[in-house]
Image: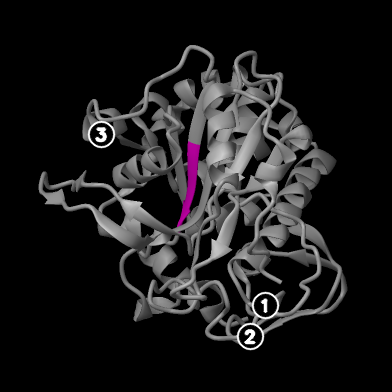
Amino acid sequence: MSHDAISQDTHEGRSASHGGGRKRRQGPRKRRRGLKITLGVLVVLLLAGGGTAYWMYQDLDGNIKGVDIDKALGEDRPEKLPTSGQNLLVLGSDSRAGAENKELGGGGAVGGARSDTALVVHIPEGRTRATAVSIPRDTLVTRPECVKADGSKMASAERVMFNSVYSQVGPSCVVKTVEKMSGVRIDHYLEINFAGFKDLVDAIGGVTVDVEEPIKDSASGLDLTAGTHKLNGTESLAYVRTRHGIGDGSDLGRIGLQQQFLLALLTEIKSQDLLGSPTDTYKIANSATKSLTTDEGLASLTSLAEFARSMNGVDPSSMETIMLPVAYDKQDPNRVVAAEPQAGTLWKAIRTDGTIPESAKKSPATGG
């Protein structure tokens, strides 16, 4: 499989929502809205929250990198409401830092990094359920004024592609951008990169997926017949990132594949009883934490485990998954914008811990 499988869609300037000018299908068939999710991070939380003795991997603390989000953002943030529960921003980054990530990203052809996956996870007070809202990477947003790591300021800009904010300014600005567009206060930040995802899948011996229709993506090299396939780490990464071989070739079309893969990954872990094996648990945790970045509040195995234990009552299988309602941009049909009033209604329900109306879950842009 070509390593171009992983890098073919990371340039901001490349086509996005319609896969480089492919015509939008008329009457697109309904596609499951997916959970764009950083799988490695959630497995670490699952391992810690499952009652595993986290003292066994306190030596893994050094693997986790911390970002001081609160210091970077200051006071210009949404109010923390008493009933707002916990809100996490989970990112999957396509960083080319390090030899392994560079190889997964297609060698030296692509520089910098972008947020390939973005997910706001809302956990209400009581923590017995959760809602995950995915933000399509091709969404045009207003990037607020942000402070770079060197202390210099980046001026606000309109009509910026969401996944470019990470490379332009860094994770703190991604948090600020999400807070500005949603009005939702983000309590924690978690990020995992390409190599961490690949190593995680390889650590559990691969993941079995059921492919409903053949997937042939000439750009990525991913070629799967309909049926059951067991994917290794590199193949899994291509699977959750492929888009040219499904739907209309858009970022929206692959969201359903990502949700399917998440369920398959959790099923694999359960079937192997990895949570009952300290050795296997350590191996998986080591693979995930090597590429993990969090806010300072979670930047240790102890803090991460304590947070996960507080969510023991949340059943991942009952998590509601929603794609941010978007519409094709009128100026550039290869991009999308938040659809109103649906998006505003959705974010208000998250902010106030209210019920999300069905009308707020419907997206005019479907991905074909």
Q: Amino acid at mark 2?
A: Lys
Kind of element beneath mark 3: helix
- Note whether residue 25 is visible: yes
Q: Earlier in the sequence, mark 3 or mark 1?
A: 3
Residue 248: numbered disc = 1
Q: Nearer the viewer, residue 327 or 191?
A: 327
Quadrant location of the N terminus in the rendered image: bottom right
**Residue 352 sits in quarter:** top right
Q: Residues within 10 Å of mark 3 (few under 14, many from 20)?
A: some
Q: Residues within 10 Å of mark 1 (few under 14, many from 20)?
A: many
Q: Residues within 10 Å of mark 2 (few under 14, many from 20)?
A: few
Q: Amino acid at mark 1?
A: Asp
Question: Residue 204: x and y, percent?
Answer: 69, 50
Tell me whether circle 1 and circle 2 mark residues in contact (CB < 8 Å).
yes
Quick check: is 79 in the magenta stretch? Answer: no
Question: Residue 324: x and y, percent?
Answer: 58, 49
> Residue at coordinates 31% horizontally, 66% vertically from top-left?
112
**Total marks in image:** 3
Kind of element beneath mark 1: loop
Q: CA distance from mark 3 to mark 2?
A: 41 Å
Question: Residue 319: x and y, percent?
Answer: 72, 35
> Residue at coordinates 18% horizontally, 48% vertically from top-left?
148
| Apparent side of residue 217 relative to residue 219 in the rendered image (left or right) | right
> Label 2: which residue?
23
Give the residues in magenta. Answer: 89-93
Question: Residue 317: x and y, percent?
Answer: 78, 36
Kind of element beneath mark 2: loop
Quadrant location of the C terminus in the rendered image: bottom right
> Label 3: which residue?
73
Residue lying furthest front in this view? 341
Q: CA distance from mark 3 to mark 1?
A: 38 Å
Q: Amino acid at mark 3?
A: Leu
